[in-house]
Image: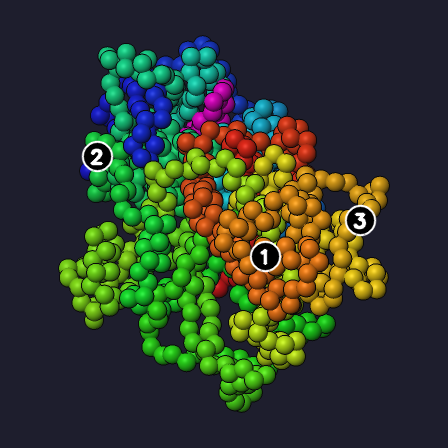
Amino acid sequence: MVKNAAELIPAPTTKFVLYNQAGEPKAYYRVDRQPLSEKDENSKTEAVEAIAHSIIVIDRSGSMYHDINPLKETLIKLLTLEEYTHSQLVVTLISYSSQGNLISHFQRVPIQEVMKLNSSYIQDIQNIRVSGATCISQALQLATELIQPDELTGITLHSDGYANHPNVRSEVASLEQICQNLNQNNVFLNAIAYSASSDFKLLSRLANLVSGTCVQAGTVKQVYDSLYNTSKVLGEAIAWAIEEPLFKEYDYQLFLSHSARKLNGNAGKLKILGLKPDDDGIFYKYQKLTEAEFEQLSDIPLAQTDESVFTFAKAQLIDGNLNLAKYALVSTFDATLSQRHGKAITNSQLVEFSQDLDKAIYDPQSLSDREILSEVPINKNLPILELIQLFETHKDPIILNLKHLQDHYQRRGVKRIPGQRDAEGNLVKPWLKTEYVDSGDYVQMGSFDINRNTATINLLITRPVKLVKSEDKTPITEVAGILLNDLKSYNNYTLVGDGELNVETLKVKFSNAKVFKVFKEQNLLTDADQFDFNTEYEIDLTQLPIVPMAADYTQVQGIFSRLAILRVLSSLLSAHLKEVSETYTADQLAALKEHYLSKSLYLNFPTTTEYSDLEEALNTGKVDSRVSYKIELGNCEILNLGQLHSANKFLDRFYEVCDRQTGEKLDKPTFAQSLDTPVVFGHKTLSKRTKVTKVDDLMKPIFDEFLGLEKNGSVTELLQELGAADLVSSLEKKWQGETVETEQFVEDLTGGLRKVNQALETLYRDKISPLVFHIGATGLIPDELEVVAYTADELSAKSGDLKFSKSEKEGLFFEVGDLIISVYPKTEYYSVS
């Protein structure tokens, strides 16, 4: 049994070292304890009048479709309790959904009026209906306007989703400003994060700003308990309003009440409301020291496992400082909790992290069999990022139990079905479909892909298929003289999505003893005594860190410039090849397209969503949304690769293309046209309205040389470096007016594109994807990168050349040398099974 650390070390002053997850010291702290009963005259304590106001704010967005009726029953049950018969409580009920969809059902009504049989207020609750998205700020703003200075007000904020309407960033900013204003009054705010889809992180931060707490409620019973507790506090004749200043020698303080299960922290003054007269309380004051100052405090006990370190972790988690929260947790030397929550980043993981910290603080005995070490617990298992490299290297002698994967797989996106919708929204199914050729539970181990913008790893499984007619399953074995003997289906399974493990275990078999030994030596296989090609081995992904703790992310100088140049050149080469093939004629390509086949014989069936109206699907609970974070790289001139023009758009923007024989200027020219028609390229006379940007400055030298208008080395030197000498030779012939056969030029373009894309893939694999994945999987910028964070407005003021789209203004930006790392919130929709 683990005892409360405060019982083990009752000293009024302690100290601790803040370590990172690799066991390296990051900071040093002295902690002073100040019990509530010993508060000096600098703290202000005053009685609050007995009249109290309960403002209940509920979410009725579309995602509440299946839960709104139980919630209404819960509200009615709460507001008709017999114990309120003589209460001086007044009640307000507000419900919200999309921006502008706000209802004040009743305001400042005495609880006894609500309780009356068949009261209109109860009928108002029964008439609540769901619709729309989630705009919380409008409801809290209305609640603010209903507060009276001579009352104690308790706001209960209920939400089951993300504050995303009209957009995430403006909504969060509005909410934080409203809560800061609320804190100037006799108000506390308790938040209820209802369901795993709610934004627990944001709701916790809002509650902390207004002297409240946030609870995760997975059932209406838990919602009832939270609402009841708020009403009970408000029902007390006297509550305490406490203001605690933060003196200059301290850097942070928090207040903890075990009896009220309440913790609030701030790097400034604290205001505490919502306590009952008999509640206990203690202030923890944190002073950050240098290592030398820390070592000089030899008479102060070192208390890594003390309650003050757990409360520091909880306070940082509430504030949204996930970095510090995780560091504080590992600094407690609690191996059990550190392993369980060391990679928490998603909403559900943060909820579990918060709940276990609550247990460690308020009820440590409930956490049985905890392992407390004498140093930082470090997960030395192979990271998942390195595991997939191991799979890629040795995949040939490994087969995967696909049935096990499918049986335990959770879809993360919106389900799509074959077909497309006509003008009336009716589903038109393809006239062909595929059938699997193979059978059995096992498939060859697939390939892995790390998403370039999110912390997502996909496993691509390839299986042989045959093409058949949908109506009678007649096989299609040949199209346009091309045999379809080697058709494949490609299915992606997300192992890690937005930093969250989506598949817990993989089951595999080995046909090579040496490969088996490699995996066994990395402690990846459970119950793996010896090699047996008939035995199925399990790989438990839950025991592996997602990213390596000691990776080097510092080699980022100049990385975006090379990335951008490669992307421009790839776009330029691809634009030539979009409509052509090295092998097939135009008639053959048309026939392949009719059979849903690409020029490379990839299957491209049209797909659509199960619903025809997204708004309706949201309102009826068939589809819900979550916020994910997209990570982009740029520099102080170009914010991200998305700002680059397509090759054909840039061609039309800056160049004229004329028929070499007639001199006629082509209207809306494309690079694909230049393969069939002899053309001459020239610079276009720009209109006064055309504003040349930094994107243009990057792309123009590349296009000028490729088109033979200027020899500057930007294309030829790079292609030579990448081993695309044949394409350089063809280009030089064209520049000198020599004829290059179309078939030969297409072959050289294809080879050059392959080399450019290989260089891009290598750059992403070695330099970019690990950095993007670390940020997305941990929620942290790597410690070794000394970064400055900016909003869009701040970065724009610093770098006047940058242009921001509406969605890009939602981002947060980190400057690392000449690199800008952008993190954008993005609403993702998913099917509710």
Q: Residue at x 48, y 64 (%)?
A: 833
Quarter occupied by residue 323: top left
Q: Residues within 10 Å of mark 3 (few under 14, many from 20)?
A: few
Circle 3 sits in a helix, a strand or a loop, which is it? loop
Dot 3 and dot 2 residues touching (CB under 8 Å) = no
Q: Specify start and end residues of the magenta stretch as a single range.
A: 258-276
Residue 264: where, in percent of width, then height? 44, 28
Q: Earlier in the sequence, mark 1 or mark 3?
A: 3
Quarter occupied by the N terminus = top left
Please tell me whether residue 551 is drawn above or below residue 523 in the rendered image: above
Q: Is residue 437 left or right of residue 511?
A: right
Query: Mark 1 is on which residue type?
Result: Ser
Q: Residue furthest left?
A: 529
Question: Which numbered mark, 1 or 3, is in the foreground of this view?
Answer: 1
Circle 1 sits in a helix, a strand or a loop, which is it? helix
Dot label at residue 228: none
Magenta region includes residue 556: no
Q: Is residue 124 visible?
A: no
Residue 213: where, in percent of width, then height? 46, 35
Q: Which residue is mark 1?
A: 729
Q: Is residue 422 left or right of residue 548?
A: right
